[in-house]
């Protein structure tokens, strides 16, 4: 989690359409959008876990 790794994650249809474009700017935008959508659940789980940990620690 400390290092950023460039990934290309697309469905088959998105990949086929975006590979035909010159410049690949739209493909990069789609990839960034996929990464942002993937990060949100992990952030939410982390926040919920932290709140549960903090509440459990207060109870002791």
Image (spheres, grey):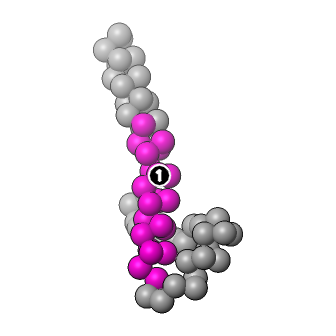
Residue 24 point in image, percent of width and height: 46, 83
- Which residue is at the front of the view, 30 or 1? 30
Residue 39 is inside the magenta segment? yes
Q: Which residue is mark 1?
A: 37
Residue at 48% from the left image edge and 42% from the top image edge: 41
Magenta region: 24-44
| Residue that sits furthest to the right in the current view | 12
In-front residue for pair 33/7: 33
19 versus 44 height, above or below: below
Up-down relation of residue 11 to residue 42 (above or below)? below
Q: Residue at x 44, y 60 (%)?
A: 33
**Where on the picture, by quarter, is residue 13?**
bottom right
Residue drawn where x is 50% and y is 52% of the image: 38
Mark 1 burial class by Cα count in 10 Å: few <14, some 14-19, many 20+? few
Can see residue 51? yes
Residue that appears at 47% across and 51% down: 37
């Amino acid at each position: 989690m400390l290092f950023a790794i460039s990934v290309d994650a697309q469905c088959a249809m998105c990949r086929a359409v975006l590979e035909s474009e010159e410049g690949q700017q739209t493909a990069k935008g789609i990839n960034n959008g996929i990464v942002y959508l993937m990060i949100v659940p992990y952030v939410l789980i982390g926040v919920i876990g932290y709140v549960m940990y903090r509440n459990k620690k207060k109870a002791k």
